Image: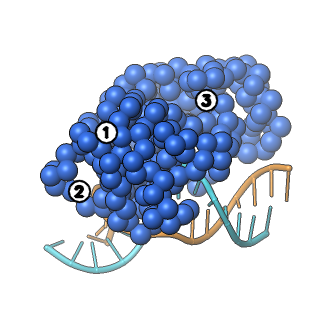
Chain colours: A blue, B orange, C cyan
Amino acid sequence: MPELPEVETVRRDLVRVVAGHRIEAVEVTGRRTVRRQSPQDLKERVGGMSVDSVRRASKYLLLDLSSGDVLVVHLRMSGQLRWHQPDDERAAHTHAVVGFGHGEVRFVDPRTFGELFVVGAGELPFRVGADPLDDGLTGAGLAAALGHRRRPLKVALMDQQIVAGIGNIYADEICHRAGVRTDRRTDTVTARQWGRLAEAAGSVLTAAVAARGSSLRDAQYVDLFGRPGAYQQEHRVYAREGLPCPACGRPIRRGVVGQRSTFFCPRCQK
DNA sequence: ACAAATACCTGTAAGC
DNA sequence: TGCTTACAGGTATTTG
């Protein structure tokens, strides 16, 4: 579910609420939520530590602890982090709770794809590519990293090892803004198109962060306080099959690219 | 080395 | 009103 704008929104909320605060208690009830180590090990390494800072790497949230360890959270498809008081009723599928003196962060995840784990600083078990917000993308950079392969463009844009943070919604929005077909093989994308893609990635994701992310009708994504985002109102193609393209008025079509639902304008994207 | 398919889960909406 | 099927924001692993 959550892509860069949604994860970044939650990160900013966490900075406001928990940065500088001490973790008083950790509870793990989900059977799959902590799966890279024992829940006991995670609790021992997290309990009693302060949260020095909260960073984002691609779609991972990284809570830097005073011990030097990092508490890593990935929401995957259906995970949420929610701020509550201990006596608030717990939502179904609440799998972990990190308690502070002034409230608690709950990890809620119906599909249980999401996870929590703790690693030492510098031991992050994943590699992430350039961040469109932090690093800025260039057409030349995208062409060099992606242009020699034969994958569909959309699949390449969602490769977290190359470009960090783009998922199914924003890949479609970025391709539409750039005027490029989602199923174009990357070795056929022109330099001009790579330039437009780099620019579109920056502008779409920046605007989506400003709008605090996209919430679809099932409201799976909400921020730390349960509030939906607003960027879905600015979607030009995603989940808009049959509705007019904002640029040309032709109906938006739906297809499948890389086994994922894909929305596009048959006229604007070449 | 690369690309495509599959697996991991539960909830919801659509279709009959 | 059920019942069945398709589909959902992601990524690691397996297969070809």
Residue tagged by mark 1?
Answer: A224
A117, C5: nearer the viewer: A117
Q: Is residue A82 left or right of residue B5?
A: left
Residue A138: x and y in percent read 70, 20
Please rate how many residues cluster around mark 2, counting C-alpha atoms within 10 Å: few if below 14, some from 14 to 19, many from 20: few
Same-chain check, marks 1 and 2: yes
Q: Residue at x 45, y 57 (%)?
A: A44
The x, y position of residue A105, in whole percent, is: 31, 46
> Are the residues under marks 2 and 3 on the same chain?
yes
The x, y position of residue A167, in whole percent, is 54, 41
User: Does A64 sit above or below residue A194?
Assistant: below
Measured from the top left, where is residue A128 in percent x and y? 65, 40
Crowd rating for badge 3 (residues with CA inside 10 Å; few <14, some 14–19, many 20+): many
Q: Can residue A69 be seen by looking at this rendering?
A: yes
Query: Which dot, 1 or 3, sits closer to the camera?
Result: 1
Residue type, numbered disc 3: Asp
Q: Amino acid at mark 1?
A: Leu
In the shown orientation, is residue A18 left or right of residue A173? left
Disc 1 to disc 3, how far (Cα)? 22 Å
Mark before the other along the chain sequence, 2 or 3: 2
* Tag 2 residue: A91
Q: Residue at x 23, y 39 (%)?
A: A102
Say if mark 1 contacts mark 3, CB within 8 Å. no
Number of numbered labels in the structure image:
3
Mark 1: give few (<14), some (14-19) or many (20+) Cα within 10 Å: many
Q: Nearer the viewer, residue C9 or A51?
A: A51
The residue indicated by pointer 3 is: A131
In what element is the residue under mark 3? loop
- What chain letter is assigned to the residue under label 3? A
